[in-house]
Amino acid sequence: MVLKYQSGEEIKNCDRVLLHGEPAEVVFVSSASDDPSIDLFYREHGEGIMLSEPKVFGHAFIPANQLDEAEYLKYVSRADSLSRDSKKSMIQGVVEWLKQLPKKIRSK
């Protein structure tokens, strides 16, 4: 399934967005993937998007079924392409952060 912002643009990795008015970035789109880190996250949490917003939220996951109502998420622009290694490093950092959360919180 292709995930889209309310404005109709397709959500892509590294997009620049506003999350509750704060600048943020799409770290990755969670879906079935050849990338083991993303696939693991997808199997545990389902489809959606992982965002990074360091000022207020840190990392936030928005499930796909909430995107249609996510008025607090605004598309700004496409980011410059990251190298594959940079993207992989960023994703691995989020996965490691998630592993540290108590299982009760991760399963919600």
Image (spheres, rainbow, N blue to C red):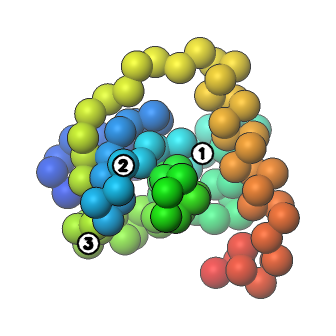
Work out how far the residue at label 2 is from the one at label 1, CA to CA, in angstroms: 27 Å
Q: Is residue 62 left or right of residue 17?
A: right
Q: Which is more N-terminal, label 3 or label 2?
A: 2
The residue tagged 3 is 69
Which is closer to the viewer, label 2 or label 3?
2
Judge depth for marks 1 and 3 and give the one in front.
Answer: 3
Q: Position of residue 31 (x, y in %)?
A: 55, 48
Q: How many numbered marks appear?
A: 3
Quadrant housing residue 41: bottom right
What numbered label is drawn on residue 32? 1
Report the amino acid beneath label 2: Pro
Residue at screen point 26% across, 72% down: 69
Q: Disc 1 residue type?
A: Ala
In this rendering, is residue 13 above or below 97?
above
Mark 1 and 3 residues: CB-CB less than 8 Å, in contact?
no
Quadrant assignment, res 22: bottom left
Compare marks 2 and 1 and give the one earlier in the sequence.
Answer: 2
Circle 2 Cα neighbour tier, 10 Å, few/some/many (<14 / 14–19 / ≥20): some
The 10 Å Cα crowd at callout 1, few under 14, some 14 to 19, many 20 or more, is some
Q: Position of residue 55 (x, y in %)?
A: 49, 57
Q: Is residue 3 left or right of residue 104?
A: left
Q: Position of residue 106 (x, y in %)?
A: 72, 73
**Which residue is disc 2 drawn over?**
23
Disc 3 on helix, strand or loop?
helix
Q: Is residue 27 left or right of residue 14?
A: right
Kindly tell me whether residue 86 is visible in this rendering.
Answer: yes
